[in-house]
């Protein structure tokens, strides 16, 4: 089965979200989507999430996101078509690709892009190489600082980029090397099938060596294996296509946004190629208003017409007002990016250097088709949950916090990462965190005493934490005068890199577990290993030793021994107690009273009948006296 | 010869009431054990619930007030100077309450007053004392003879006995145990105080 060369592999983050390129943004996400190549289902890729971004259509598999995920470049897409639900078949979006040759040819002549470096802020701008820069007006401004560079800068850049195209030709002989395309911006060696750099998203120079030696149809990403259920039937059609199947709806909105994204991308391409005049405004495709036959028609038909026109009017009003909202949101986004750009200037600020909070490619409610629906809300929370995991694990935020963070701190950190507006609410955070387990994310949300914390999977076990503390006290604890080791919260929190409140909670739970005990005095709390329970345990072991057992057995027969002998027994219990105390604690208990050797007690204790007991008793006593006097 | 404190006595958390119930019960037991053996060693008969020793050593006269010295100094058992730790009054009170429940102390004023502040420390239970006295009387052949309490506690014959010098009130409790079992009879003088005991 020939594999389409349009499939590309996708880098997936720890939270199984696609890693987006620098200027790529999420547009929409939809769950429960299956993939088709041509007419046939693609095996093992029938349950996943489809992400529509400004540059790609990404499929992330729900079962094995690492291996099965793939993407399609929107720039490869020619057109899309929508097929509604029919009987048992789910609604589908068919995506037709551009056939290869014309697009390549076009690219080689006009769409070449040049990267030039702004002399002011050293930001790498991209611009079309074939624009006419003779006219001063057309010199592009830097995207970051807004300063227009010298003509020379751009000229040099264009010349360099022309060299880039030639260079591969020189290397034609070196076949193994020439297969990979070096990114002009970051020098990453990309797979020959790539057209944008996998690392920075820069448009790659076309490798002529590859083009001349390999047939285009054979260039495909060999990291992907596509297996279709049946014959895909692509041989019979001139334009290759794939399909997205929506098992749980959301198809219409997806289709709409997809079309919009395509249109936008095409428009941007046009602009970047310099094919659009300055200040040109894209003409909105005005749907030609059908002249309403208002004057015609009578009776029911007329009523129906009136109703229809009224709904149409309402729709227009709603649409126009929503447009305003969207415009506002767009402005807000602009302001946001403005804030971002000012942030860079703030490097002198000591505090901002202290802890760099990674900014987050934001998941907002706008990626949902219908935020009010419950399952959509769930999807949203799951996306946030994934993003939190990225934020904590991939960006090493959690590592800085010592592998454990309170929900409160996470809330603050995460929202600070989201910058400005678009913050999530505590409820949403909690909801998102509760999906950790379901989504197999390497994080755990749990409650230590009364504080909710998010924890690295590595420390899943509470006992693990506590035994760590135990070891810590054993090894690093301060020894007091009598060699008991202790530590305080401050030291432990420094050592484990936990926040103080978390350390305290963990210590408290260790106390509740009985592993630690506390020494509280004016200078604060010191934590010790629990010697009480250790001592008790030792004592229990001694109590269980055979010296005592037969004795305990006789004690249980108390009820058949006449009362007068109870005294004798009691005396012996008392003596035995002393003996035990003597052997366990080895401190002086009673200097005046002789301690009966435990061996003797052992022989004495096999008492069966009351008579024997009395006999034994007197024997013991005479012995005692013998010892004593 | 001085009292050798157990190892746990130098463990600083020993002087803080542990928040964990299980740990606290172990700690409590160790305290009770320590208090009892400490009192046994120093022959302390009465303590109040602030840990002040009220009666100690061989007691010849019954008067409680005479032996009341140094009311404010808590016994060294609750105060470890070596590690500079002291058990706080509330915890001591709690310990005595617990000991009262388990019979390790008995209230000085009245039988079962829970608000008592002074306690006999039963490092030997009244039953144990009773058994000891009975053994002694039997082995010395004094069964059936009338003995005064003074004779039992401070007589020459009981010189080597553990109960020699016992606090008269505690001895009284022990004798009462014997009376209850029908092994002893109390003879009272005209003031209603115990004049003598006849043990059979």
Image (spheres, rainbow, N blue to C red):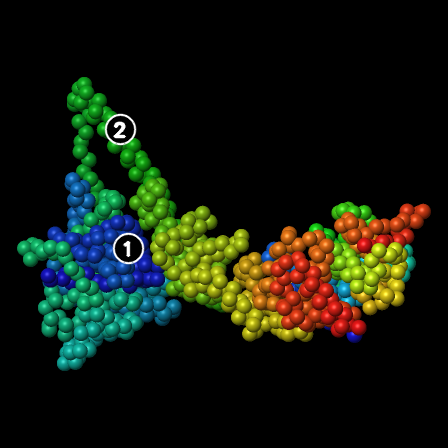
Residue A483 location (% of width, % of height): 64, 74
Real-space Cα separation, disc 1 to disc 2, in angstroms: 45 Å
Per the image, label 2 sits on a secondary structure element best described as helix
The circle drawn on residue A310 is 2
Residue A124 location (% of width, % of height): 32, 68
Residue A308 location (% of width, % of height): 23, 28
Q: Is residue B132 rendered to the left or right of residue A401?
A: right
Q: Name the image quarter holding the C terminus of chain B.
A: bottom right
* Residue farthest along the top direction in this orientation: A299
* Residue farthest along the bottom direction in this orientation: A173
Residue A524 in view, yes or no: no
Q: In which quarter of the image is residue B121?
A: bottom right
Residue drawn 19% across the image and 44% down it: A91
* Residue that numbered label 1 is attached to: A62
Q: Nearer the viewer, residue A253 or A401?
A: A401
Residue drawn 20% across the image and 73% down it: A180
Other residues around mark 2 within 10 Å, as few (<14) / some (14–19) / many (≥20): few
Per the image, label 1 sits on a secondary structure element best described as loop
Q: Is residue A577 rendered to the left or right of residue A252?
A: right
């Amino acid at each position: 089965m020939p594999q389409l060369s349009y499939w590309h592999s996708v880098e997936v983050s720890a939270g199984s979200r696609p890693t987006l390129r620098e200027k790529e943004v999420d547009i929409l996400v939809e769950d429960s989507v299956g993939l088709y190549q041509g007419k046939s289902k693609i095996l093992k890729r029938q349950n996943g999430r489809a992400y529509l971004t400004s540059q790609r259509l990404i499929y992330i598999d729900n079962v094995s996101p690492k291996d099965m995920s793939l993407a399609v470049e929107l720039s490869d897409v020619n057109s899309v078509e929508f097929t509604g639900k029919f009987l048992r078949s789910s609604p589908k979006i068919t995506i037709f690709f551009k056939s290869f040759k014309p697009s390549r040819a076009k690219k080689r002549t006009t769409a070449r892009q040049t990267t030039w470096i702004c002399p002011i802020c050293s930001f790498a701008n991209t611009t079309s190489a074939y624009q006419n820069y003779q006219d001063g007006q057309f010199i592009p401004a830097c995207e970051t600082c807004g300063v227009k560079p010298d003509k020379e800068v751009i000229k040099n850049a264009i010349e360099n980029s022309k060299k880039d195209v030639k260079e591969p030709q020189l290397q034609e002989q070196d076949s193994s090397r020439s297969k990979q395309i070096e990114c002009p911006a970051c020098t990453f060696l990309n797979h020959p099938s790539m057209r944008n750099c996998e690392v920075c998203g820069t448009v790659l120079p076309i490798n002529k060596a590859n083009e001349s030696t390999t047939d285009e149809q054979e260039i495909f990403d060999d990291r992907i294996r596509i297996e279709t259920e049946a014959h895909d039937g692509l041989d019979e059609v001139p334009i290759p296509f794939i399909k997205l199947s929506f098992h749980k709806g959301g198809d219409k909105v997806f289709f709409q946004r997809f079309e919009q994204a395509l249109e936008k991308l095409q428009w941007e391409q046009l602009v970047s190629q310099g094919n659009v005049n300055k200040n040109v405004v894209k003409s909105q495709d005005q749907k030609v208003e059908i002249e309403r036959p208002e004057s015609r028609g009578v009776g029911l038909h007329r009523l129906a017409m009136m109703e229809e026109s009224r709904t149409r009017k309402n729709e227009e009003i709603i649409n126009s007002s929503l447009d305003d909202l969207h415009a506002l949101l767009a402005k807000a986004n602009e302001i946001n990016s403005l804030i971002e750009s000012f942030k860079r200037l703030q490097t002198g600020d000591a505090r901002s250097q202290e802890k760099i909070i990674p900014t987050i490619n934001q998941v907002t409610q706008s990626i949902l088709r219908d935020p009010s629906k419950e399952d959509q809300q769930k999807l949203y929370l799951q996306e946030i949950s994934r993003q939190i995991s990225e934020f904590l694990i991939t960006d090493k935020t959690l590592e800085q916090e010592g592998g454990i963070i309170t929900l409160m701190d996470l809330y603050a950190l995460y929202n600070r990462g989201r910058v400005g507006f678009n913050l999530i609410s505590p409820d949403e955070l909690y909801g998102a965190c509760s999906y950790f387990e379901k989504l197999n994310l390497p994080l755990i949300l749990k409650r230590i005493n009364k504080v909710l914390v998010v924890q690295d999977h590595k420390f899943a076990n509470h006992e693990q934490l506590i035994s760590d503390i135990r070891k810590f006290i054993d090894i690093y604890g301060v020894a007091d005068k009598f060699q008991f080791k202790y530590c305080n919260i401050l030291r432990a929190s420094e050592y484990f890199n936990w926040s103080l409140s978390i350390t305290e909670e963990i210590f408290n739970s260790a106390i509740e577990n009985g592993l630690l005990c506390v020494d509280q005095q004016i200078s604060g709390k010191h934590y010790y290993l629990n010697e009480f329970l250790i001592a008790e345990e030792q004592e229990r072991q001694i109590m269980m030793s055979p010296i005592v057992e037969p004795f305990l057995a006789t004690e249980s027969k108390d009820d058949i021994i006449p009362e007068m002998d109870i005294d004798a027994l009691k005396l012996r219990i008392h003596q035995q107690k002393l003996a035990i105390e003597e052997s366990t604690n080895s401190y002086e208990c009673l200097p005046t009273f002789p301690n009966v050797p435990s061996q003797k007690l052992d022989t004495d204790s096999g008492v069966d009948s009351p008579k024997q007991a009395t006999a034994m008793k007197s024997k013991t006593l005479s012995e005692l006296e013998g010892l004593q006097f | 010869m001085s009292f050798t404190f157990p190892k746990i006595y130098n463990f600083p958390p020993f002087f803080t009431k542990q928040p964990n119930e299980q740990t606290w019960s172990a700690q409590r037991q160790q305290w009770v054990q320590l208090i009892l053996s400490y009192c046994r060693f120093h022959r302390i008969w009465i303590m109040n619930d602030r840990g002040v020793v009220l009666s100690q050593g061989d007691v010849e006269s019954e008067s409680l007030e005479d032996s009341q010295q140094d009311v404010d100094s808590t016994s060294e058992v609750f105060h470890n100077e070596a590690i500079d730790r002291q058990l706080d009054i509330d915890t001591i009170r709690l310990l005595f309450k617990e000991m009262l429940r388990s019979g390790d102390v008995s209230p000085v004023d009245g039988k079962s007053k829970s608000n008592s502040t002074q306690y006999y420390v039963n490092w030997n239970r009244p039953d144990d004392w009773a058994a000891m006295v009975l053994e002694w009387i039997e082995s010395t052949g004094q069964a059936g003879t009338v003995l005064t309490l003074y004779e039992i506690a401070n007589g020459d014959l009981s010189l080597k006995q553990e109960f020699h010098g016992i606090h008269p009130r505690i001895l009284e409790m022990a004798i009462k145990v014997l009376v209850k079992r029908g092994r002893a009879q109390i003879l009272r003088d005209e003031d209603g105080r115990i004049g003598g005991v006849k043990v059979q």
